[in-house]
Image (cartoon, grey):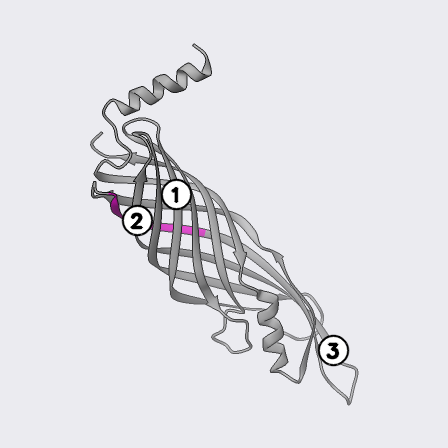
């Protein structure tokens, strides 16, 4: 039996009593990559422009991607609609910026700061699923998530600018797309893209700031198990 024949046999086996959008509960999980965006350098430039005693010499999002993973559980109602609860670890990102104290009385000290951001989110989404064949379907998701962003900052120079850490919790919107292949009546293979908007607070100098606001996209490959199949 060649590869083409094997795929045809598998497809016929799945289609004999299993439909992609069959109603019921499912659980799953998987992993992939998170990508941080949101214009951090522009946020820094805006904040320093309001601080005449400080000058921003350079800034960058030194590392904008990391591994990510998620767990989920949901229910299909059988009419294309469903609900899904999920938890996602959004990995980490890193920033670096070089600033200088503006002074006309003495040589201006400068400092180089390295920052790290760790993010995660959990929430509930509603979805709609289109069935292309008994084994293949696609879905769109939209929901609300509780997202946390923890920030850690380290001073890489001798100038006294202390290390510190703080975090921020926000309710943010999340959106997603999925492509689902029903491998067996009980097992699905799912390719997902999810995006979480506005995690954290814009870069600033107040104690409650998280020194960065991000949109985070996650591409992941997941396995799901359907109960009762």
Q: Residues within 10 Å of mark 2 (few under 14, many from 20)?
A: many
Residue 128 magenta: no
**Would you say the residues marked 3 and 2 are in contact, meaning their CB atoms lie under 8 Å apart?**
no
Near-viewer residue (122 or 106): 122
Residue named by callout 3: 109
In the shown orientation, is residue 125 left or right of residue 157?
left
Q: Nearer the viewer, mark 3 or mark 2?
A: 2
CA gap between label 1 and label 3 equals 51 Å
Taking 216 as reference, is 22 above or below it?
above
- Tell me where the magenta segment starts and ends, as one range: 80-89
**Snapshot quadrant of residue 10:** top left
**Snapshot quadrant of residue 21:** top left
Which secondary structure, mark 1?
strand
Q: Nearer the viewer, mark 1 or mark 3?
A: 1
Q: Residue at x 40, y 16 (%)?
A: 6
Residue named by callout 1: 178
Q: Which mark is residue 152?
A: none
CA gap between label 1 and label 2 equals 10 Å
Which secondary structure, mark 3?
loop
Q: Answer with mark 1 or mark 2, whichever residue precedes in sequence.
A: 2
Give coordinates of residue 146: x percent, y percent: 36, 61
Q: Residue at x 28, y 24 (%)?
A: 15
Q: Residue at x 25, y 43 (%)?
A: 80
Q: Residue at x 46, y 12 (%)?
A: 2
CA gap between label 3 and label 2 equals 54 Å
In the shown orientation, is residue 186 left or right of residue 42?
left
Q: Residues within 10 Å of mark 3 (few under 14, many from 20)?
A: some
Task: Locate the N terminus by quadrant.
Answer: top left
Residue farthest to the front, as pictured: 132
**Would you say the residues marked 1 and 3 are in contact, meaning their CB atoms lie under 8 Å apart?**
no
**Would you say the residues marked 1 and 2 are in contact, meaning their CB atoms lie under 8 Å apart?**
yes
Residue named by callout 2: 127
């Amino acid at each position: 039996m060649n590869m083409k024949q094997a795929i045809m046999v598998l497809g016929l086996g799945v289609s004999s009593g299993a439909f992609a959008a069959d109603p019921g509960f499912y659980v799953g999980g998987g992993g992939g990559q998170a990508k941080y965006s949101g214009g951090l350098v522009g946020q820094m430039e805006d904040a320093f422009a309001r601080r005449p005693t400080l000058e921003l010499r350079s800034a960058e999002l030194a590392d904008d991607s990391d591994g990510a993973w998620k767990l989920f559980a949901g229910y299909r109602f059988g009419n294309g609609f469903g609900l899904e609860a999920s938890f996602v670890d959004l990995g980490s990102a890193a920033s670096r910026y070089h600033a200088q104290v503006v002074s006309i009385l003495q040589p201006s000290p400068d400092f180089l700061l390295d920052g790290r951001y760790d993010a995660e989110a959990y929430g509930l989404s509603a979805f709609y699923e289109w069935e292309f064949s008994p084994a293949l379907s696609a879905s769109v998701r939209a929901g609300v998530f509780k997202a946390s962003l923890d920030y850690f900052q380290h001073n890489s120079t001798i100038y006294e600018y202390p290390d510190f850490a703080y975090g921020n919790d926000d309710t943010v919107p999340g959106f997603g797309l999925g492509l689902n292949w029903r491998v067996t009546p009980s097992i699905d293979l799912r390719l997902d893209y999810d995006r979480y908007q506005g995690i954290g607070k814009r870069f600033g100098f107040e104690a409650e700031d998280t020194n960065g606001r991000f949109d985070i996209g996650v591409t992941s490959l997941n396995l799901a198990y359907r109960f009762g199949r």
